Image (cartoon, grey):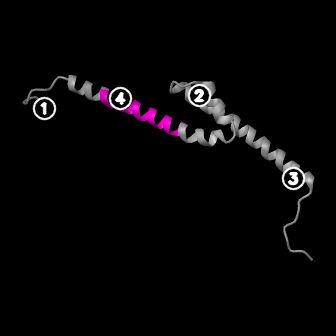
Amino acid sequence: MEHGPQQLPPEILWSLFIGYGVFLLIFVVFIAIGFWFVAGRIGRTKWAWALLSIIPFVNFLFFPYAFFRVLLYVLDQLNTIVAAAAAAQEDLPTQPAGMA
């Protein structure tokens, strides 16, 4: 009686491989669509971001870059809003001391 790992039949291995591949393909397509819209919003090339998110192994390097690029874009937009609000606050007329 052997106590080692058992080999699965080839039919089961192929069905697992194909099922996993279909899942990955569907998942990657949704990720690429998301990157297409994000790239358009932040002013980057849409097709390049979608393509880089699809290519295996390249996407592992691209995802952190895209994350920090979007994060920096959001922070830049927030800094712009804060600066505009501060400038608008300075332009408001001040009330006299007795009028509270």
Q: Secondary structure at mark 3?
A: helix
Magenta-drawn segment: 66-83
Question: Tag 1: residue type?
Answer: Ala
User: Measured from the top left, where is residue 94 in percent x and y?
Assistant: 15, 26
The image's mark for residue 81 is 4
Which residue position holds label 3?
13
Nearer-N-terminus badge (2/1): 2
Q: Identify the mark at residue 37; answer none if there is no mark.
A: 2
Residue type at tag 4 = Ile
Q: Are marks 1 and 4 in contact (CB under 8 Å)?
A: no
Calculate the distance from the C-alpha at mark 4 to the C-alpha at mark 3.
Answer: 55 Å
Q: Secondary structure at mark 2?
A: helix
Density class for disc 4 (Cα within 10 Å; few <14, some 14-19, many ≥20) is few
Type of amino acid at the residue the image marks with label 2: Phe
Picture coordinates of residue 6, whole percent (x, y)? 87, 65
Label 1 residue SS: loop
Q: Is 68 within the magenta?
A: yes
Q: Residues within 10 Å of mark 2 (few under 14, many from 20)?
A: some
Task: Answer with mark 1 or mark 4, whichever residue precedes in sequence.
Answer: 4
**N-terminal of the two: label 3 or label 2?**
3
Instruction: Please rate how many residues cluster around mark 3, counting C-alpha atoms within 10 Å: few if below 14, some from 14 to 19, many from 20.
Output: few
Q: Residues within 10 Å of mark 1 (few under 14, many from 20)?
A: few
Q: What residue is rendered at 88% in x and 49% in y?
A: 14
Distance CA(mark 3)–CA(mark 2): 37 Å
Residue denoted by label 1: 100
Q: Which mark is residue 54?
A: none
Q: Position of residue 12 (x, y in %)?
A: 89, 53
Disc 3 residue type (three-letter): Leu
Image-based side of 56 in relation to 86, left or right: right
Residue 19, magenta (yes or no): no
